[in-house]
Amino acid sequence: MTINEIAENDCRMILGRGSLGRLGCALNDQPYIVPIYFAYEPDFFYVLSTVGQKIHWMRENPKVCIQVDEIEDQSRWASVIANGTYEELPEPADSPERTHARKLLEKQHHWWLNAIAERRAKVDDLLIDPIFFRIHIDSMTGLRASGATAES
């Protein structure tokens, strides 16, 4: 198996095909990683969430990363890590930024499900305020593995 760096244009193509990734944030020298659904467009990830640990932490430390993978098997995969900055998209609900985020996210299957279902499992209140945010991408790197599998 060979592992090589991926050019930025190829990283962007992988991000464009993705909709599920892992968000990494940190506070007080403690990392926290959670799966997220996202919509991507050049320079930004758009995400829907509800208030919880990741939102509290990102409000305190907006420096984050998102990892997106494409995995064929153990020896054929690609992984992109985008480093960026958390930006909450504030009310009103019909602001241009939130409307844009919602339109992008609505193209993804069950884009709202994780955030709302997770919060409803923890609280009795069915009126849960959604939080739209975006990650402005500052840099990205990627690796791709190719080669024979162990069975070959």
Image (cartoon, rainbow, N blue to C red):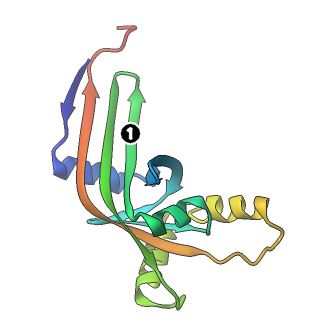
Position in image of residue 140 (x %, y %): 24, 51
Q: Which residue is pictured at 35% across the width and 14% down the height? A: 149
Instruction: Say if 152 sits above or below 90 in the image.
Output: above
- Relative to the observer, which residue lies in front, 40 or 135? 135
Instruction: Please state, as top left, top right, bottom left or bottom right, where the N terminus lies in the image.
Output: top left
Position in image of residue 143 (x %, y %): 25, 36
Residue 152 appears left or right of 12: right
Residue 60 appears left or right of 142: right
- Relative to the observer, which residue lies in front, 96 or 149? 96
Position in image of residue 2 (x %, y %): 22, 21
Q: Which residue is pictured at 51% across the width and 57% down the height? A: 37
- Relative to the observer, which residue lies in front, 132 or 151? 132
* Residue linked to disc 1: 70
Q: Quadrant of residue 89?
A: bottom left
| Residue lying at the far front of the rendered structure | 28
Q: Which residue is pictured at 26% across the width and 19% down the height? A: 147
